[in-house]
Amino acid sequence: MLLDIRRKYRLEKLLVALQGLEKLRINEAASLLNVSEMTIRRDISSGQNSLRLLGGYIVASASLNGMSNNRYFITEQQERNVVEKQKIGILAASLVQNNDTIFFDSGTTIPFIIHAIDDSIKFTALCYSIHAFLALKQKANCRVILCGGEFKESSQVFIPITQPNELTNIYSNKAFISAAGVCAAKGVTTWVLDEVSVKQLAIQNSEYTLLVSDNEKFEVVRPGLFANLEDFDELITNDTPPESINNFILHSNIKLTLPLTE
């Protein structure tokens, strides 16, 4: 009986982790739940769940995300640094308050923030990516505004094609912004050039901007420059940044938020 309860708890945790992902590495799942990989395999093989094993990965059935082609996320990035992103998600979600109006960016860390938000909190969310929208619609007390525009298959986002639009007409008091590269000297960058203008407008129209990034992105530069590091009020990450970024933060009045040391 106790074994079944523990197994059910672990499987529920895995389902939460897979909301916003196509797949999860078994070793990352084991680290997340503090059990062995063999335990993870046994839990999933019990057959009383909607998860399945595929090589070294855990995969949710297509019905979990409501799509049959399993293409609705950026597959190359979703499987990376899951534990780190969950830590960032918990930190960021703790800042969400009742009656907030929040912009949620398109990055792969964003679903972890949304899933960690207390279900009792009432807030309005503005987003332009499919994966953020599908996570937000699970929050019963969230009013979700999905920005329209041209759909970009590769990044699964809608890029506005008219002015004015939702992004120009709605101001947020908080904005969670993701990045593919964070560099003190060369700024904050993204892989996706189409997203540059959207991110810039979100930063411009937000009272308080939060950069959410795992430590793998530090001192990395990608093609699309959308902001300087000093444009942000707070950096939320999973580990202490390198010296160059840390020194910049100290001298730029940027708040640095890290997980508590275990």
Image: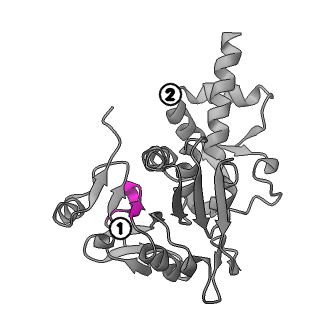
Q: Position of residue 52 (x, y in %)?
A: 75, 39
Q: Position of residue 75 (x, y in %)?
A: 63, 61
Instruction: Please report the residue visible at 57 percent of the width from the left and 37 percent of the height from the top.
Output: 29
Q: Name the side, left or right, on which 182 lies relative to 101.
A: left
Amino acid at dot 1: Val
User: Which stretch is magenta?
Assistant: 208-218
Amino acid at dot 2: Asn
Q: Secondary structure at mark 1?
A: strand
Q: Name the side, left or right, on which 220 lies relative to 85.
A: left
Q: Is residue 61 magenta?
A: no
| Depth order, front residue of 150/18 | 150
Q: Position of residue 107 (x, y in %)?
A: 53, 63
| Depth order, front residue of 254/4 | 254
Instruction: Please report the residue visible at 66 percent of the width from the left and 11 percent of the height from the top.
Output: 2
| Depth order, front residue of 160/54 | 160
Which residue was labeled with disc 2? 34
The relative height of residue 156 versus residue 159 in the rendered view (above or below) is above
Instruction: Please report the residue visible at 31 percent of the width from the left and 71 percent of the height from the top.
Output: 229
Quadrant location of residue 87?
top left
Q: Name the side, left or right, on which 36 lies relative to 133.
A: left
Q: Position of residue 136 (x, y in %)?
A: 65, 55
Which residue was labeled with disc 1? 182
| C-alpha span from label 1 to label 2 | 30 Å
Quadrant of the drawing holding the C terminus:
top left
Badge 1 crowding class, 10 Å Cα cut-off, few under 14, some 14 to 19, many 20 or more, is many
The tag earlier along the polypeptide, 1 or 2, is 2
Instruction: Please report the residue visible at 34 percent of the width from the left and 67 percent of the height from the top.
Output: 232
Looking at the rendered structure, which numbered label has been put on residue 84? none
Question: Is residue 20 visible in the rendered structure shown here?
Answer: no
Badge 2 crowding class, 10 Å Cα cut-off, few under 14, some 14 to 19, many 20 or more, is few
